[in-house]
Amino acid sequence: MKRIIIIGATSGIGYEVANIYRRLGWRVGVAGRRTERLEAFKEQAPEQIEIQQIDVTQADAVDKFHQLIEKLGGMDIFLLSTGVGSQNRALDPKIELATVNTNAIGFTRMVTAAYNYFQEQGKGHLAVISSIAGTKGLGAAPSYSATKRFQNTYIDALAQLARMKKLPITFTDIRPGFVKTDLLKNDKYPLLMRLEKVAKRIVRALNHKKRNVIIDWRYAVLVFLWRLIPEGIWERLSIHN
């Protein structure tokens, strides 16, 4: 029986992906900050699901991660779905630093732990959910877009490192656009995607071991166009996150 661990699975994309793998019969390890959500998820299939309370911003996160791996009996796929983001036009330092703490420092903490586990195991599939926001610096959300670019580049670097070491580790960088989750509760965002549809496409991408995935062709076109815009013009645009 195959095994997947999803960090950030108490709600949103991570929760939906975990549900799909549960229905597919996988052994599923789920982690997040909200214990009551984790316990409720485990009740759906107690013999198939293992849970662990993990806050990626805390130093004990890696130890707890290894505890979850042990409970599950190993790990074939690792998916990091945790992250924070908000508009910060006032440039409140607390918001900026909290975003960096989760999306950059917490991200690095968990991804390096997964990489090192797969390196010791001799194989594995390391996947993260980043964002198309890493394509360009967004004035409405500086630390969010910057940390998403950090995530994209970090996975690129690890993929190269694994090749240098001849390690059979697969990498998948999943870059959604606007998804209708608790973070985006209204329909005012453009190109808002249904959560269930996004989760299915993520599972399909993981099963096919895709390297980079932009969910929805409309966002793929948007990202292509964004990359063509010169810096001088980009700085004069009002792009909303």
Image (tube, helix red, strand yellow):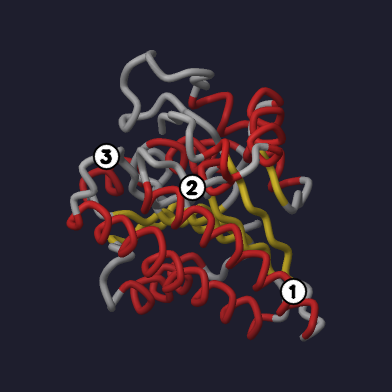
Check the picture and name the quadrant holding the C terminus. top left
- Where is mark 1, residue-wise? 160
> In the picture shown, does residue 75 fall above or below 237?
below
Secondary structure under badge 2? Answer: loop
**x and y, in percent, of residue 203 in the image:** 64, 40
Q: Residue at x 58, y 24 (%)?
A: 197
- Reading the chain from its start, which is encountered first: label 3 or label 2? 3
- Where is mark 2, residue-wise? 137
Residue extending furthest toward the front? 232
Q: Nearer the viewer, residue 221 or 60?
A: 221
Q: Residue at x 73, y 46 (%)?
A: 207
1 or 3: mark nearer the eye? 3
**x and y, in percent, of residue 164 in the image:** 79, 83
- Reading the chain from its start, which is encountered first: label 2 or label 1? 2
Q: Nearer the viewer, residue 86 or 25?
A: 86
Decide if residue 29 is on the left or right side of residue 174. Answer: left
Check the picture and name the quadrant holding the N terminus. bottom right
Q: CA distance from mark 1 to mark 3?
A: 36 Å
Secondary structure under badge 1? Answer: helix
Q: Residue at x 67, y 65 (%)?
A: 156
**Amino acid type for the residue under numbered disc 1:** Gln
**Amino acid type for the residue under numbered disc 2:** Gly
- Where is mark 3, residue-wise? 89
Q: Residues within 10 Å of mark 1 (few under 14, many from 20)?
A: few
**Amino acid type for the residue under numbered disc 3:** Arg
2 or 1: mark nearer the eye? 2
- Reading the chain from its start, which is encountered first: label 1 or label 3? 3
> In the picture shown, does residue 115 fall above or below 144?
below
Decide if residue 112 is on the left or right side of residue 207. Answer: left
Q: CA distance from mark 3 to mark 2?
A: 13 Å
